[in-house]
Image (tube, rainbow, N blue to C red):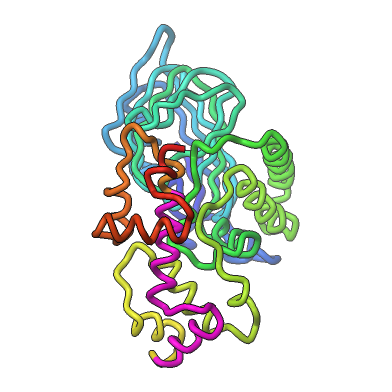
Amino acid sequence: MTTTASHPRLSRPESPGTGRSDQDGPTTGRHAVRLEASGDHPDAVIDEVGGLYDGHGWAAHATDQPFTYRYTAVGDAAVTLRRSRITGYIRGAIPCTDDYIVQWLTEGTGVPDVRRDRVPMQIGVPMLFPTDREFVFEYQDYDQRLVHLSRELVDDVAAERHRTGAVGSLQLDHLHTLDPAAVARWRNQMTLLARELRNGVGTLLWHTLTRDAAAAFLDLYPPAAPELPAVVLLPRRARLRAAVEFVHEHLDQPLTVAEIAQAAGLSIRAVQESFQRDLGTTPMAYLRRVRLECVRLELQRGDPSNASVQEIARRWGFSHLGRFSGEYLRQHGEYPRQTLRR
């Protein structure tokens, strides 16, 4: 196995290390990633590729032909284009990663998540790995293309294009039905990136193309995170925006008005007045409103056969089901169980 990278794993490099980097141009500090692993023994692919992904519980074996594997990756800290080929069978768990990972098969069979979703791959059709949680994959005799995009890059582009601001999660649906036009834009962007790789990752064009790739990715998988109110995007509302972004980034954590005020560099009274004046509500009421939006998004994506309104509500901090249902009805015009069943 040979590697040239700034970090030993197939994830976003975090330190320069000994890897080659393009020191000139606009992408200084974004170090080149070049990785290759190949062999003909099942234990080797588990050690090499499984180790690169921090995987566990991996198993591999030959099928009806000799076992072989080859894994390559090239790009930089923001985007890497990868290819995985295995003649044989492989299965294993991958924990939450630093990257969003889009992958598709050109041959063979595979199920990205056999433990929960159990949706098989279709040749040539992209699918997002559920990288916000651990998942267990299973593939056989396949040729797979993968694109890793750093969360930092995607979140930054999402903040510009979708007014998400700094959020804890974009709440992407990895089983989202893909728009054919978005798939065509994605494929075209991958072609452009592959061509520009011949010139290295230190060019202005590469920097531009990686941001365009993140935009194409968000067309494939639009963020479901609640948008920031338009008023907080005004330049003179910088402190209010800091407060609102802090709320959005910590929706799944206990928050107090004092913590929100501190994040914005305001007094408690000033942050309360700012929310009331510009958003027509209090900081805590705003927090509950956005959490109710998150509940709605989760209910819309939930499976009525096994999802529980009560469990989802509790996960977002609503303990009293009756009061929660009343608040939800006032905000969304229907009861939560109606959202789940649609």
Magenta residues span: 269-297
The image position of residue 342, as x and y in percent, is: 47, 38
What residue occupies the far left of the structure in this picture? 319
Say if 296 sits above or below 254 in the image.
above
The image position of residue 167, as x and y in percent, is: 47, 64
- Asked whether 278 or 25 is in front, the reply is 278
Taking 18 as reference, is 250 left or right? Answer: left
- Asked whether 332 or 77 is in front, the reply is 332
Split into 4 quadrants, where in the image is the N terminus?
top left
163 within the magenta span: no
295 within the magenta span: yes
The overriding secondary structure of the stretch rendered in magenta is helix
Taking 87 as reference, is 123 left or right? Answer: right
Say if 140 sits above or below 3 in the image.
above
Quadrant for residue 63, please give it.
Answer: top left
- Asked whether 198 or 214 is in front, the reply is 214
What residue occupies the far top of the structure in this picture? 64
Identify which residue is drawn at 31% across, 26% down: 43
The image position of residue 142, as x and y in percent, is: 50, 21
Say if 5 sits above or below 261 in the image.
above
Taking 132 as reference, is 84 left or right? Answer: right
Identify which residue is drawn at 54% across, 28% down: 144
The image position of residue 334, as x and y in percent, is: 45, 50
